Image (spheres, rainbow, N blue to C red):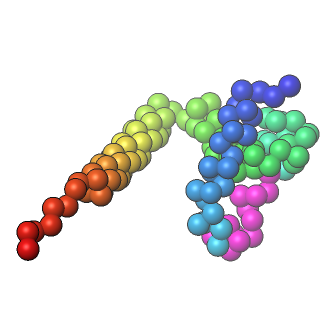
Amino acid sequence: MIDTIELFSFLGFPARVAGRALLAFRYVMNRGSTAHVTTDYAERRFGKSVRWKPWITIDTKELEEHEELINRGDDAHVESWRVSQLSVCGMIAIIVGTTLLMNDTALTIWRVPWSRPAA
């Protein structure tokens, strides 16, 4: 049976792969350190079949860091992480909002009937 976290990880896998495709050179230069998922943490968290779940390979290192922060970090570190994540989300919202506004403006310009001057 698939856990909820595995289901969301599976559904978001294509988007995360596409988003990280530009970082492929960095992954290759690091000798695939992020692709190595058969760590003790991954096997404890997801079981022995983790190597057959490629949608988890991207997030294993980040999940381990987040669990370490939540379980063993002090309140100041958790709060600073939360503030940094909120600021990132705010920047994404600004960028997406600006992009949508520019797209809407461009579509409006294309729909405006252009009048030709009388000859």
Q: Is 92 on the left or on the right of 117, as rendered? A: right
* The residue positioned farthest toward the right in the image shown: 48
Residue 32 falls within the magenta-colored stretch: yes
**Residue 1 seen in the figure:** yes
Count of marks, rendered view: 0
Residue 41 falls within the magenta-colored stretch: no
Q: Quadrant of residue 21?
A: bottom right
The majority secondary structure of the magenta stretch comes to loop
Tell me which segment is drawn in magenta: 26-37
Which residue is pictured at 81% across the width and 28% down the height? Answer: 2
Q: Position of residue 110 (x, y in %)?
A: 30, 58
Q: Nearer the viewer, residue 29 or 22?
A: 22
Which residue is pictured at 83% across the width and 44% down the height? Answer: 53
For the C terminus, which image quadrant?
bottom left
Q: Nearer the viewer, residue 36 or 23?
A: 23
Q: Nearer the viewer, residue 57 or 77?
A: 57
Q: Position of residue 64 (x, y in %)?
A: 68, 42
Which residue is pictured at 23% across the width and 54% down the height? Answer: 112
Which residue is pictured at 75% across the width and 50% down the height? Answer: 57
